Image (spheres, helix red, strand yellow):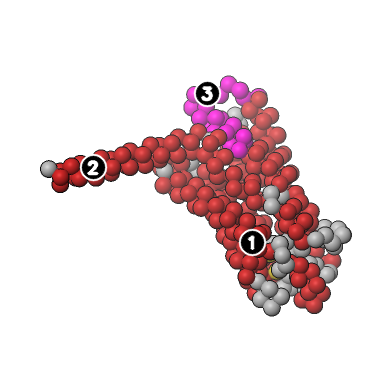
Amino acid sequence: MEGDNVTFEYVYDFYGPSASWFAIYIGATSTFIVISNIFFTILTLSTPKLRENVANWFLVGLSISDQLHYLSHVVDAYAIYTGSINNRYWCSVSGAFVLITGTCSFGFPALIAADRYYKISTISQPSGFSLSSALFSKRATIPLIVSWFFIAAISNLPLMLNDAFGEDPSGFCGAKKFTSIPLLLGYEFSVVFAYFGSLVVTGVFYYRLAKWLKLHQTASTGNRQEVDYTRSIMRVMKIVTLMPAFLDGPVMTLTAMQMLLPEMPMWINRALVVPYFLSSAANPWLTIALVKQFRVSFLQLLFNAKKTVILNAYTVNRSTIVRQL
């Protein structure tokens, strides 16, 4: 088990002067991300055209995993702000959920890219059974999403069994400073592997999608909508993949190489962690802006809301005039 006496010295700095501003930043950005993703999920599930497109369920899965991940960071912010050397319980609890839900979120861009490739490539290929086509079939979508959530949780089992959650040397509540190689390797093969593995898999399927679309530039009218949707998702996934590669890199490096890197002041580590939250804050709004199905539904929602406000204002004004007469 990870001994508290080993990590005790750096924990003083964890709850030191930089804790207040960092906790406020985490709390504010995480709350915005949770609200944004709740709105995105409600927009998708409440709009028949979006809900009926099975491919959108992977986007909903990413949205739900981000909701859970950043809800964990809200608790993380509370733990940092109110915690101390003698009050570390909530950091341990939130750290467990931060890592488990983070592992899950990292994998969804790869699932979305793979789903798009196998869905779109069947347009030009004769139907036939294959493992990939069965795995990404319409009726396998929900089981696949649920299975990924389960795999993400199980992959963190070595950390759970060894009380490895708590004050991360990077400055947030995640994995406590590792004092044994096996636990570090367990972390590397769960969270870190999911992060970098997802980037590689997404890049591979993005390349294959681009190659397929180039060879099939002229799609039939019946398939044009599917091709246009795929192009839009590719634009979103390109940004969703590249942004974390730059913004999340410092977090993954600091945590994954904590036993090799020299110890730095906590405020510097936390300054490097700040960009981590920006990519997830942009994800739902990028999807709404770049994917036509979502953009049209969002604009329709705004139009209906504006119409309702105007109608209510007219009703109130009319009632006021009638009372005055």
Label 3 to label 2: alpha-carbon separation: 53 Å
Per the rendering, the mark at residue 288 is none
Residue drawn at point x = 73 percent, y = 57 percent: 270
Comparing marks 1 and 3, which lies closer to the viewer? 1
Image x and y of residue 110, in percent: 66, 45
Q: Camera-side residue: 55 or 235?
A: 235
Between discs 1 and 3, the one toward the N terminus:
1
Q: For the stretch drawn in magenta, what is the main secondary structure?
A: helix
Q: Residues within 10 Å of mark 2 (few under 14, many from 20)?
A: few
Image x and y of residue 76, in percent: 63, 64
Kind of residue indicated by mark 3: Ser
Label 2 to label 1: alpha-carbon separation: 46 Å
Per the rendering, the mark at residue 220 is 3
Which of the 4 image quadrants contains residue 129? top right
Q: Are marks 1 and 3 in contact (CB under 8 Å)?
A: no
Name the secondary structure under disc 3: loop
In the rendered view, tell whether residue 88 sits above or below residue 106. below
According to the image, label 1 marks what residue?
A: 23
Comparing marks 3 and 2, which lies closer to the viewer? 2
In the image, which residues are magenta?
215-236
Q: Camera-side residue: 119 or 164?
A: 164
Residue drawn at point x = 45 percent, y = 49 percent: 42
Per the rendering, the mark at residue 317 is 2
In this rendering, would 115 be left or right of 315? Answer: right
> Which quadrant of the rendered structure holds the N terminus?
bottom right
Q: Is residue 229 magenta?
A: yes
Between discs 2 and 1, the one toward the N terminus:
1
